[in-house]
Every structure is written in C-alpha cells, then in structure tokens.
Amino acid sequence: MRSTVRETLAAALLDMSDKLRSQWVLNWPGQIVIAGCQVAWTAGVEAGLRENRLTAFQDEMQQLVCLNAYEYVKPTEFTTR
C-alpha cells in the first residue's frame, strides 16, 4: 500500500506542474491531493520567501480556498425526536 501511495503521489506531483492547481485537485484521490498540496505549499512558501514573491503565491492559494468553498455541501441537519 505504501508503495502504491508513493508511486501515485510521484505521478500526481509531476502532473501538478502541467495543470492549474484548481483543476489538479479534482483529478486525484483525496489522500494524494492532501499530501501533494502539502509538498507544493512548502515548496511555494520557500520559493516565495527566497524570491520575494510571496504575494503571488498567496493569490494562488486564495483561488483554492474559493474552489473549496464552492464545492462545499452543507451537511444534512439531523433532528432528534
């Protein structure tokens, strides 16, 4: 199982460079998206700090927040009797 996750994550990270992140997150399983986003976030923050372009990175992250808010479905409210 670990090797499958590792291989899938490696493929997803390669795919991430070819797509917009907002499209990429919809094409991969949740566990891979979480791990891949953590890798990309760390790399993005490091590059943003090093190259003084953190604002551009923050804008990209805001697009993902908006995507997540759009996809959010309110859980059904349960009533007790």
Image (tube, rainbow, N blue to C red):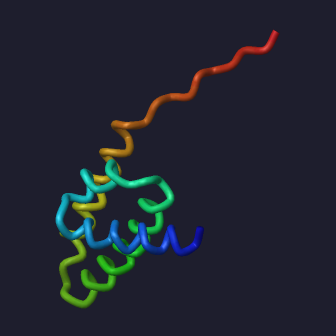
Pick whichever, 6 or 20, lies toward us: 6
Query: In this figure, what is the number of numbered marks?
Result: 0
Q: Quadrant of the N terminus?
A: bottom right
For the point 37% across and 74% down, which residue is it? 10
Identify the residue shown where x is 31% and y is 45%: 67
Pick the front one: 69 or 2: 2
Q: Nearer the viewer, residue 48 or 30?
A: 30
Above or below, 31 against 11 in this view is above
Image location of residue 37, percent across then percent down = 39, 66
Q: Position of residue 51 (x, y in %)?
A: 19, 87
Q: Quadrant of the C terminus?
A: top right
In the displayed orientation, state which residue is furthest to the bottom.
Answer: 50
Measuring from the top left, give residue 34's x and y in whole percent: 46, 62
Residue sitting at x 50%, y 28%: 74
In this view, 61 is above or below 46: above
Residue at x 47% of width, y 53% of height = 30
Along the horizontal axis of the image, is 73 left or right of 77?
left
Q: Position of residue 38 (x, y in %)?
A: 43, 70
Extreme residue toward the right, this view: 81
Residue most toward the top?
81
* Left or right: residue 44 compared with residue 9: left
Q: Quadrant of residue 75?
A: top right
